[in-house]
Image: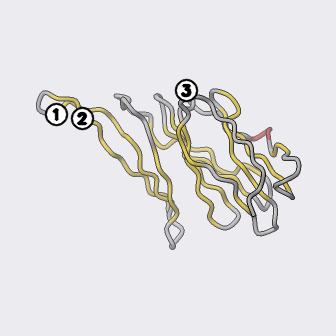
Amino acid sequence: MALPTTVLAAAGLGGHHPPYKSSGGAFYAVARKDADEVEVYKASDPTDAWTLTDTADSPVHVGTILGFATVQDGDVIHMVAWSSAAYEYYTFNMATDQWVVDQAIETPANAPTFPWASIAVRSDGDVVVVYAGDTDSVMGGTKERVDVNIRT
């Protein structure tokens, strides 16, 4: 059964963030609030009203968010958000409806031309973030690094 859904997105905002279902049966969706914040919405029935959760602790990103990616592991939504200034890692606990982690991953010295990131959780619980790192000059040309951050 397809659920009626409306998706609003800012032009040029990259990332992947589907709705998630918690172990308690509630549904959660992550969205960009404004230029530097993400927020989480909750619904007990995805065809009904969605309400904003834990606005007091929602993370504030360094720079304008260009995109973000999310992945669910149990009752935790792991996410990475990126701007031209920084990459940051956040977690939201669906069991408690609270933001838990707000940590910087990297602030590239020479920002990448096209910032991007992807996030995954391994079976052992490690969180792996792969992203565009610093831009370097190599043999007379400009090259962009691919960096990795592993949280154990």
* Position of 24 relative to 64 (above/below): below
Judge the density around disc 2: few (<14), some (14-19), many (≥20) Cα neighbours within 10 Å: some
Q: Residue at x 81, y 61 (%)?
A: 26
Percent position of residue 81, x then y: 55, 41
* Residue 143: mark: 2
Q: Is residue 40 above or below residue 44?
A: above
Residue with the mark numbered 1: 138
Residue at image location 44% in from the left, 57% down from the top: 150
Inspect the image, locate mark 1, and give the three-letter code of the amino acid beneath it. Val
Q: Residue furthest front?
A: 1
Q: Which mark is residue 63?
A: 3
Q: Are marks 1 and 2 in contact (CB under 8 Å)?
A: yes
- Dividing the picture into quadrants, the one containing residue 57 is top right
Q: Secondary structure at mark 3?
A: loop
Comparing 30 with 61, the one in front is 30
Give left or right: position of 4 versus 105.
Answer: right
Q: Residue at x 67, y 67 (%)?
A: 74
